[in-house]
Image (spheres, rainbow, N blue to C red):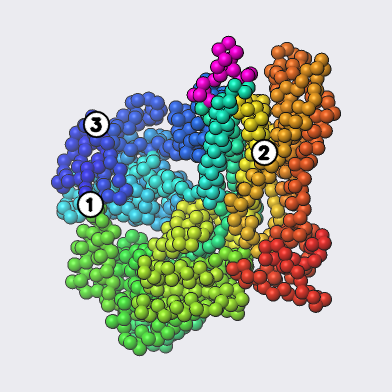
């Protein structure tokens, strides 16, 4: 990688390039020549951090941020935290840029431009512009509110005080004033204000304990270590004389990786005797405290700021945002394009009509100027009518829809968070981090889930083990210790068992601690991995007790004798390596490598050095354990010679102190050591299922979702968990297993699986990791996709994190299905990010999955309610909102088209401009919003009883083109009816005295009244349930319509109390005429009658599935509901209707609706 100069300057030290020769002499500061730091997360860009020892008044607080004297010099990162998107100056341009990414707003911006051109707008430009500004304003206020909350959080974080080294003393300062290189002192229970390299702690050994729940959700304490050469630097005077620097990697978002070096300047008294090689010390993740973590069980620690402010790892992770869009939004954008094309065609038609009328203007003498007998308008002016019509018909696209959708998703988000049934004791309420995907939860067809921590509790219990080919079923009762008593020291059985127990005690990262308030000697164990705690507890049960662990040594009480081990190196466990090793030196000076890991990677390392009979027995026991659903690992070890260790130590020091490609260099070195291992035993750990997992899985399957398990466990373990969690039902599902390494072996298995007949509940497929890699290759992927589409359940074993993401992406692209991925660990993050909807579980493996997800829940069982209740309701509500919004606007605009023909294409409006402005926002704005927030079709208890209600055609395809066309067709017919009623029924006689005829405003008022009343009736017909909020929306809309027009009329009339026909908004005399009310009532009922009839026929003769369930429950037929649920459940997938089940009286039952068996009592109801 290209190494670039990445320097951090302080006030008393100059720039030290990366290629500086060591040892070096400090240079003078030259702040004016500082070059900006280059940020690169992919390349190995590095930075030099100088320890700052700023002189000045030690008792003075640093100046405030608006004082120029304390601004960070160029190239130095400050600790100011800023997560807001906007400032007062940038809010307007930035927010407008974001809002104009939506097609809605682009269309309406175009309308505003047109109405500003003189002579093109049929009414005042204020009408269009004010409505558009209102919509933008509401959306902007929502964004501003959210950003203000971020601002308050930033302000609180920046105002926290911290002790910082100034002029040889630690003084109080606000955290935002910190700079990279500052030395800070943190006390017990305080949070770290920045990412700090640990200099020293209150403990002589330089150890400290931190809690990282704010970072990854792990509540267990982690032990960190001070840099070995600096752990004695605890006083300010010592630190003031320290002359050292830190060479670290560029800021990045990797929480669990850190590479750096500690270097000392020439002439430092404390290391004057050290050699050049000793003067360079590695800095790794165990020497760094991250911002957001909290100091625990340690009085104080001192650290140097290496990353500050927005460069801290916490903020680097927080800046990752999801960029997913729901399928409803994608469909909506397409429908807007189609509607816009329709508007263009209508405008072309009206423009052509205008040109035809213009060409025949001699037949209409009122269109000509009698003085010169020529038409009043030129051809060009007639052509410009196209833009006038475009403005006239802009209400076809509902202006208020965007605001309604945002407010609806905002409210739905809080409904989810406030739902007490979505809370757990440990995790608390669920989190909604992508409210735009609320509706997507109601259309899930594929569910991909991890096993450990997702389906299981991730609380491990050591159950069985195998040592030297001998099985032990009760090791937690001291069975191994009893077995040791039967052998003499030096016997092979004794050596195997002793090494196995020693490996359980040492090969881990468990931290023993004294329990507070407990008796002397009583310990508790903390670790990020529950597996390792269970292994240590198994060792304790057999009198191998881990007593203490430091960075370089560990103490174990082995059968009553305390033995110390020097811990020389730890080969960390990673998802790629799938194993962990620790290199130790015993008190006798022997070197031992202890390794444990997944059988898949351990078998090649143990097969050559382990006797074949022992290896064979161990594998048999391992398979037996896996078949019972337990987690299994192989344990191995080998002796290291002094010469081999010397070579390793030199290479290890070089690899661990390098910065570029440190991880790769270490992994290559580990591979040279982890070989020729002796298999000493097999561990067997039980991970119990979470509560209600079988019920939840069965609910998902009955809701016709395809459930996939993607796990890294053995094939046998995955199959057993699938059976115990009811994902695979042995009695009602046929199961195909595909496992192998080559296509010659996998191909016939695939063909057999494709020809396998499904059972009553379908077909299940189990695939091994190597087979999955082969099947997803380009030449075989089509068969794999076809096979998986026929299976209701797929279990993929031995899946790497990357494979999980590839499988999810493959299903989404090839099958074009909406998918959901759920997991709880960092290895599940790629899968969660790849799926349409990602759900993280806030569990024992931390918050990595939760941070990367769209929704976070505490347990797997809550997925059932998240999808069936919140997801189903959100999908239903959002689709009704969209359909109703388009319906009411088409109904309102259709009379404009009819009137354009009636007035000989003169491009005048029949609606008053004030009515046009208020129609979407005031007169009919509350009704769709109430639907989008409060609508329900079934109560929650019925949804829980009938999972099949989730998978109806209405729910799977909630916003089809056919549905929208049906709604718009009704709106067009009603709009045409109202147009002719207003033009002919209203215009057939006068309404005012003195022979004055009806004006266009009065006609438009009656037309608008009919539209508003008809839209309200449509609203009542479409509602599936009435609540108080629905009634409020109905009556507020009606009252708001009349009261608003009366107020607007008084405002627009020439003088108070005077009603002028044709001027203002309405003619008040019209309100007193019986004929006008008769026209409004009769034509409104006539227009609404088809909707009522269609709704009646569909409900009573062609009911949807949810209507059948609702009617049966409403009329007290709970016994029939159970039978109906059985028929739903027995219905074959793929839409094939089963033979009618005989009724109790022996006659076959009738079938109606969408492939649903419906009893006669439902039809009668």
Q: Which residue is mark 1?
A: 1
CA gap, disc 3 and disc 2: 69 Å
Is residue 454 visible from the viewing direction of this image?
yes
Of residues 669 and 388, the one nearer the viewer is 388
Residue mark closest to the camera, 3 vs 1: 1
Is residue 379 magenta-colored? yes
Residue range (magenta): 365-382
Sequence-wise, the earlier of marks 3 and 1 is 1
Q: Quadrant of residue 17?
A: top left
Callout 2: 10 Å neighbours few (<14), some, many (20+)? Answer: many
Give neighbour class at mark 1: few <14, some 14-19, many 20+ (Cα, 10 Å). Answer: few
Helix or strand or loop: what does disc 1 sit on?
loop
Q: Which mark is residue 31?
A: 3
Check disc 2 and report the residue beneath it: 891
Residue drawn at x 30%, y 50% as measured from the top left: 42
Q: Is residue 592 magenta?
A: no
Residue 202: image location, x then y, percent: 38, 50
Q: Is residue 720 above or below residue 381?
A: below
Label 3 close to label 1 by CB (< 8 Å): no
Rendering coords of residue 519 (x, y %) = 52, 64
Q: Earlier in the sequence, mark 3 or mark 2?
A: 3
Residue 1076: give x, y in percent of width and height: 80, 29
Tell whether 103 sits left or right of 1033.
Answer: left
């Amino acid at each position: 990688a290209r190494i670039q100069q990445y320097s951090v300057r302080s006030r008393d030290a100059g720039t030290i390039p990366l290629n500086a020769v060591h040892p070096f002499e400090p240079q003078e500061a030259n702040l004016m020549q500082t070059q900006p730091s280059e940020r690169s997360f992919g390349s190995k860009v590095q930075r030099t951090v100088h320890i700052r020892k700023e002189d000045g008044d030690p008792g003075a607080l640093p100046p405030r941020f608006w004082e120029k004297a304390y601004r960070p010099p160029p190239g130095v990162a400050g600790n100011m935290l800023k997560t807001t998107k906007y400032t007062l100056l940038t809010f307007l341009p930035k927010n407008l840029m974001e809002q104009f990414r939506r097609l809605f707003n682009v269309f309406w911006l175009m309308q505003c431009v047109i109405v500003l051109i003189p002579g093109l707008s049929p009414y005042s430009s204020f009408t269009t512009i004010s409505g558009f500004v209102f919509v933008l304003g509401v959306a902007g206020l929502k964004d501003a509110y959210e950003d203000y909350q971020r601002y308050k959080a930033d302000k609180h974080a920046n105002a926290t005080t911290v002790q910082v080294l100034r002029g040889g003393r630690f003084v109080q300062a606000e955290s935002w004033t910190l700079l990279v290189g500052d030395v800070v002192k943190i006390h017990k229970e305080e949070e770290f204000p920045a990412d700090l390299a640990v200099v020293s702690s209150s403990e002589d050994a330089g150890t400290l304990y931190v809690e990282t729940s704010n970072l990854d959700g792990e509540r267990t304490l982690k032990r960190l270590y001070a840099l070995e050469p600096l752990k004695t630097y605890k006083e300010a005077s010592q630190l003031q004389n320290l002359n050292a620097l830190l060479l670290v990697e560029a800021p990045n978002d990797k929480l669990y990786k850190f590479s750096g070096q500690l270097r000392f300047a020439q002439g430092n008294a404390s290391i004057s005797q050290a050699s050049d090689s000793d003067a360079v010390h590695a800095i790794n993740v165990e020497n760094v405290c991250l911002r957001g973590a909290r100091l625990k069980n340690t009085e104080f620690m001192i650290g140097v700021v290496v990353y500050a402010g927005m460069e801290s790892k916490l903020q680097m992770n927080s800046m990752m945002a999801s960029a997913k869009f729901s399928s409803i939004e994608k469909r909506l954008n397409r429908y807007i394009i189609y509607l816009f094309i329709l508007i263009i065609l209508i405008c072309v038609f009206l423009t052509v009509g205008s040109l035809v009328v213009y060409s025949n203007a001699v037949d209409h003498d009122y269109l000509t100027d009698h003085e010169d007998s020529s038409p009043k308008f030129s051809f060009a002016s007639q052509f410009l009518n196209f833009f006038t019509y475009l403005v006239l018909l802009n209400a076809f696209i509902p202006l208020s829809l965007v605001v309604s959708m945002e407010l609806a998703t905002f409210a739905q988000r809080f409904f989810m968070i406030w739902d007490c049934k979505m809370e757990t004791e440990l995790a608390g309420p669920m989190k909604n981090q992508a409210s735009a995907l609320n509706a997507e939860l109601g259309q899930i067809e594929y569910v991909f889930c991890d096993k450990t921590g997702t389906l299981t509790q991730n609380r491990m219990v050591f159950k069985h083990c195998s040592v030297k080919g001998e099985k032990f079923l009760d090791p937690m009762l001291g069975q191994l210790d009893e077995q040791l008593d039967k052998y003499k020291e030096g016997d092979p059985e004794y050596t195997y068992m002793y090494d196995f127990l020693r490996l359980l005690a040492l090969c881990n990262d468990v931290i023993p601690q004294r329990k507070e308030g407990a008796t002397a000697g009583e310990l508790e164990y903390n670790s990020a991995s529950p597996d390792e705690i269970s292994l240590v507890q198994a060792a304790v049960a057999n009198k191998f007790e881990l007593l203490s662990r430091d960075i370089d040594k560990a103490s174990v009480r082995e059968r009553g004798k305390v033995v110390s081990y020097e811990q020389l190196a730890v080969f960390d466990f990673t998802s790629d390596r799938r194993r962990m090793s620790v290199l130790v030196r015993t008190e006798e000076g022997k070197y031992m490598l202890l390794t444990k890991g997944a059988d898949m990677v351990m078998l090649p390392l143990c097969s050559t050095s382990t006797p074949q009979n022992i290896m064979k027995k161990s594998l048999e026991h391992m398979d037996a354990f896996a078949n019972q659903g337990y987690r299994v690992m192989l344990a191995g070890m080998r002796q290291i010679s002094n010469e081999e260790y010397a070579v390793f130590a030199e290479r290890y020091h070089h690899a661990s102190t390098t910065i570029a490609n440190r991880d790769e260099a270490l992994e290559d070195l580990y591979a040279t050591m982890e070989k020729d291992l002796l298999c000493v035993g097999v561990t067997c750990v039980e991970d119990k299922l979470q509560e209600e997992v079988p019920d939840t899985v069965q609910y998902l399957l009955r809701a016709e979702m395809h459930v996939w398990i993607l796990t890294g466990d053995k094939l046998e373990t995955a199959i057993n968990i699938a059976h115990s969690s009811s994902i695979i039902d042995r009695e009602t599902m046929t199961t195909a297993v595909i496992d192998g390494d080559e296509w010659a072996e996998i191909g016939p298995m695939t063909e057999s699986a494709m020809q396998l007949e499904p059972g009553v509940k379908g077909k299940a497929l189990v695939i091994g990791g190597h087979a999955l890699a082969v099947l997803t290759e380009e030449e075989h992927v089509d068969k794999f996709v076809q096979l998986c589409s026929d299976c209701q359940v797929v279990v993929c074993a031995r899946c790497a994190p990357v494979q999980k993401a590839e499988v999810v992406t493959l299903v989404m692209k090839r099958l074009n299905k909406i998918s959901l991925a759920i997991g709880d660990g960092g290895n599940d993050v790629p899968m969660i990010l790849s799926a349409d909807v990602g759900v993280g579980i806030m569990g024992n493996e931390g918050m990595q999955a939760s941070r990367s997800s769209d929704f976070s829940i505490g347990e797997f069982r809550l997925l059932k309610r998240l999808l069936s209740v919140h997801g189903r309701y959100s999908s239903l509500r959002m689709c009704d909102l969209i359909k109703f919004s388009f319906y009411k606007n088409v109904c309102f605009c259709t009379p404009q088209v009819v009137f354009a023909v009636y007035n000989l294409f003169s491009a005048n409006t029949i609606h008053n401009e004030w009515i046009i402005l208020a129609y979407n926002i005031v007169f009919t704005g509350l009704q769709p919003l109430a639907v989008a927030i409060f609508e329900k079709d079934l109560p929650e208890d019925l949804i829980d009883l009938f999972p099949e209600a989730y998978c109806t055609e209405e729910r799977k395809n909630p916003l089809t083109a056919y549905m929208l066309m049906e709604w718009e067709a009704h709106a067009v017919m009603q709009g045409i009816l109202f147009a002719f009623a207003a033009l002919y029924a209203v215009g057939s006689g006068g309404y005012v005295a003195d022979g004055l005829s009806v004006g266009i405003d009065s006609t438009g008022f009656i037309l608008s009244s009919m539209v508003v009343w008809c839209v309200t009736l449509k609203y009542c017909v479409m509602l599936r349930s009435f609540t108080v909020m629905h009634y409020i929306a109905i009556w507020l809309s009606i009252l708001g319509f009349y009261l608003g027009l009366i107020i607007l009329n008084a405002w627009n009339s020439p003088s108070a109390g005077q009603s002028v026909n044709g001027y203002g908004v309405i003619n008040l005399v019209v309100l007193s005429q019986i004929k006008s009310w008769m026209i409004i009532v009769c034509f409104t009922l006539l227009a609404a009658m088809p909707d009522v009839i269609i709704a009646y026929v569909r409900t009573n003769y062609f009911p949807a599935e949810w209507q059948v369930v609702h009617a049966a429950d409403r009329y007290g037929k709970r016994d029939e509901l159970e039978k109906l649920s059985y028929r739903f459940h027995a219905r074959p997938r793929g839409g094939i209707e089963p033979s009618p089940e005989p009724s109790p009286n022996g006659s076959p039952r009738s079938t109606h609706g969408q492939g649903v068996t419906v009893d006669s009592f439902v039809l009668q109801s």
